[in-house]
Image (spheres, helix red, strand yellow):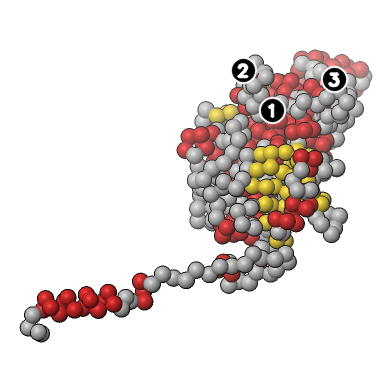
């Protein structure tokens, strides 16, 4: 029979049908029991290291009890990712905000827990603290600290006559706190975090108007050190950067643009998008762009509810800072650390009592007053002036080249220092100044804070200082 291979093949097939291999057997399914409250999950379960999560794990029953079974009386609000309820943790007096995420989300259990583990490591005074989470069955809930002041938009827009609007100092305090939160996410967190949905509705306040960024748990982590973009975008129309509408890519500088919109909201009291206004005023950035090119129009942009109770110098610098954050090209927007330095300076600018305006006198009037003063001094001054008028031609010729050389040196130094690239830089110190400019077709606002310099009483003129400001040089 061994001479006929066909019979040997049939026999082998028959043996395979009788004794199937073990690899084709159906694997056994392990049925897990529901986790009781307080049970510590080990690393072997779900193949996930739960010890990496620095937030507390709650059961769905616990959170249902905290929110009175998610009753309407505990309902706070609803966003794009779920409903938010106010609750009290059973067995304690801790008040929390429970966000019940949409159960139709595409995140699996492992992806959700990985995100919670990363977010629980982010700790900053300007971030809403993640207290805990729930991942029972198909339920996905996040537990945050409760912010009694509510969102910024409730204090900024549609203010009734019985409510007090935010004053200028509180607005700058909010802007600086938001900038510090973004600075932590961009420059101190590892890996960097793109907030991705910065808006006034996501900025929460406490009773002292201290701001904290919320809904951070709903964004994806940012790029690593060797990445530049993150392709899965989120955001709200009116706050999104222009590069998002072009390519769908989101970078750290996209958050800077959104911050510029929020800063404009704080200054003007207008919404980023308000369909109740005329067509040319519905989009806040489009309405503000022409005004950002003329510094004289900056005071007109201020919120009427402020009743002009603000330092005009601080207002001008805040508007110029917003213009820098809203630049079309992402690469020329400032870093959040520079924004924090600028706003920290603006917070120190207090409102001074109004002073009478002193108009600048023309140069010929100033010269006339000086001549009258010199004539009043007496004959001694007139005699000295006669001696000065009798100078020899040789002395004048000798002094002439010196003056020309001094002017030439001043002009050449201005040309060297004046060639700055397009984009703004911000440096903090004791004095502040705002100067609009243009570079490569883009409007640029340079916000610089130069150190105060003492001037000598004996010198007739001052030389050009380190910041590039030029004044005439005296005779040598």
**Residue sitting at x 56%, y 47%:** 105
* 215 lies left or right of 412: right
Residue located farthest toward the bottom when viewing the structure as drawn? 2
C-alpha gap between disc 2 and disc 3: 35 Å
Residue 22, image quadrant:
bottom left
Sequence-first tag of 2 and 3? 2
- Say which residue label 3 marks: 357
Q: Which mark is residue 271?
A: 1
Residue 374 falls in image quadrant: top right
Q: Is residue 310 above or below residue 103?
A: above
Q: Crowding at label 1, few (<14), some or many (≥20) Cα neighbours within 10 Å?
A: many
Give 42 or 219, whichever is nearer the viewer: 42
Would residue 401 be seen by someone viewing this image from the given angle?
no
Q: Secondary structure at mark 1?
A: loop
Q: Residues within 10 Å of mark 3 (few under 14, many from 20)?
A: few
Q: Which residue is at a point 79% across and 22% down the rendered structure image?
A: 304
Left or right: where does residue 443 sit relative to residue 456?
left
């Amino acid at each position: 029979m061994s001479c006929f291979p066909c019979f040997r093949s049939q026999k082998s097939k028959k043996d395979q049908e009788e004794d199937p291999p073990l690899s084709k057997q159906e694997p056994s399914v392990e049925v897990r029991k529901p986790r009781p409250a307080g049970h510590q999950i080990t690393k072997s379960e779900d193949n996930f290291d739960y010890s990496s999560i620095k937030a507390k794990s709650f059961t769905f029953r616990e959170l249902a009890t905290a929110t009175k079974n998610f009753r309407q009386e505990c309902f706070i609000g609803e966003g794009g990712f779920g409903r938010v309820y106010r609750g009290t943790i059973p067995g304690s007096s801790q008040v929390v905000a429970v966000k019940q995420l949409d159960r139709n989300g595409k995140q699996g259990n492992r992806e959700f827990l990985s995100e919670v583990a990363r977010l629980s490591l982010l700790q900053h005074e300007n971030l809403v603290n993640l207290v805990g989470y729930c991942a029972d069955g198909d339920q996905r809930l996040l537990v945050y600290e409760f912010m009694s002041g509510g969102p910024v938009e409730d204090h900024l827009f549609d203010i009734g006559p019985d409510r007090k609007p935010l004053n200028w100092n509180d607005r700058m305090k909010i802007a600086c706190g938001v900038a510090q939160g973004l600075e932590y996410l961009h420059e101190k967190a590892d890996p960097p975090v793109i907030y991705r949905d910065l808006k006034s509705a996501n900025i929460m306040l406490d009773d002292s108007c201290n701001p904290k960024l919320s809904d951070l748990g709903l964004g994806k982590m940012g790029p690593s050190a060797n990445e530049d973009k993150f392709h899965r975008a989120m955001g709200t129309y009116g706050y999104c950067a222009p590069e998002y509408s072009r390519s769908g890519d989101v970078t750290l500088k996209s958050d800077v643009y959104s911050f510029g919109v929020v800063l404009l909201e704080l200054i003007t009291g207008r919404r980023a998008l308000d369909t109740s206004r005329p067509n040319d005023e519905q989009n806040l950035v489009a309405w503000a762009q022409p005004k950002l090119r003329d510094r004289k129009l900056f005071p007109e942009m201020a919120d009427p509810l402020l009743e002009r109770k603000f330092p005009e110098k601080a207002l001008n610098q805040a508007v110029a800072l917003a213009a820098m954050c809203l630049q079309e090209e992402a690469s020329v927007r400032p870093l959040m650390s520079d924004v924090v330095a600028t706003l920290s300076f603006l917070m120190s600018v207090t409102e001074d009592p109004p002073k009478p305006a002193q108009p600048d006198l023309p140069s010929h009037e100033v010269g006339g007053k000086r001549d009258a003063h010199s004539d009043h001094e007496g004959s001694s001054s007139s005699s000295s002036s006669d001696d000065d008028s009798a100078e020899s031609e040789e002395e004048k010729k000798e002094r002439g080249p010196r003056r020309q050389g001094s002017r030439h040196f001043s002009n050449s130094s201005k040309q060297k220092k004046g060639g700055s690239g397009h984009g703004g830089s911000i440096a903090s110190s004791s004095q502040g100044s705002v100067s609009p400019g243009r570079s490569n077709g883009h409007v640029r606002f340079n916000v610089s804070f130069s150190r105060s310099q003492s001037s000598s009483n004996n010198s007739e003129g001052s030389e050009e200082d380190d910041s590039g400001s030029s004044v005439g040089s005296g005779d040598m």
